[in-house]
Amino acid sequence: MTETENETKIRTPRQERSIKTKEAILQAAMKLFSEKGYHQTNTKEIAAAAGVSTGSFYSYYKDKRAVFLDSLIIYNKTLLGRIETYLAEINFNSMDKHEFIRELIDSLIYSHQAFTEFHKELQVMYHSDPEVQALMDEQFELGRRRTLEYLLMNPEELKVDHVEAASIVVFEALNSVVDMLVFAPRNVNADQIKNELAKMIVSYLYK
């Protein structure tokens, strides 16, 4: 089947059964990409793991790259959704700032841990596929903007010279340390690292 033929047959699921079939393909693909790697996984394996025929797979996706990109979108939405849920439950005015940063770090770690293996494969794809890189860069930019929004909620408490620049510094520090704790653990106690990061951010940001 040619790529053009595939594209003409791709359908958007509307009925519950079709929606569940596409979801099963997505979940099977993410699991296989995590376990075997993107390049070692083929569409036949994804279809089999999802419990559908190869022909059915091609009814929803033109190739494995398409399902990988769809998986990435789901990955990004899930991570963001978990963080937004956490932030919505916080009373920023009453919570101790150090406690807030510590709990935010824990929330970020929890969100990442659900996709540990998929994230590893994603790191490889980021450097080899421009579209994957663009989607991830968009996600990073969204994280930076969300950090800026948080800082602007109480600007009178800040001591930084440039809030937007500070939001980037804080986001990158959080992102780097969380990635290290989840994907490349060190010998130093994780709680000690989280405490020092929280102290550093609070000291940097607030009067």
Image: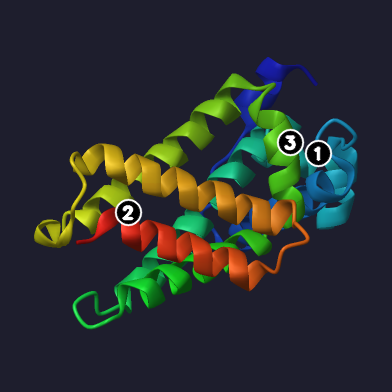
Tell me whether the residue at label 3 lies in contact with that at label 1, contact meaning CB atoms closer than 8 angstroms.
yes
Q: Secondary structure at mark 1?
A: helix
Q: Secondary structure at mark 3?
A: helix
Name which of mark 3 and mark 2 comes first in the sequence. Answer: 3
Tell me whether the residue at label 3 lies in contact with that at label 2, contact meaning CB atoms closer than 8 angstroms.
no
Residue 116 location, x and y as percent?
72, 56
Q: Which of labels 1 and 2 is toward the front? A: 2
Residue drawn at x 50%, y 27% is: 134
Q: Is residue 124 left or right of residue 151?
A: right
Residue 191 location, x and y as percent?
61, 72
Q: Secondary structure at mark 2?
A: helix
Type of amino acid under label 3: Tyr
- Disc 1 versus disc 2: distance between alpha carbons? 56 Å
Residue 23 location, x and y as percent?
65, 57
Residue tagged 2: 204
Q: Residue 58, which numbered label?
A: 3
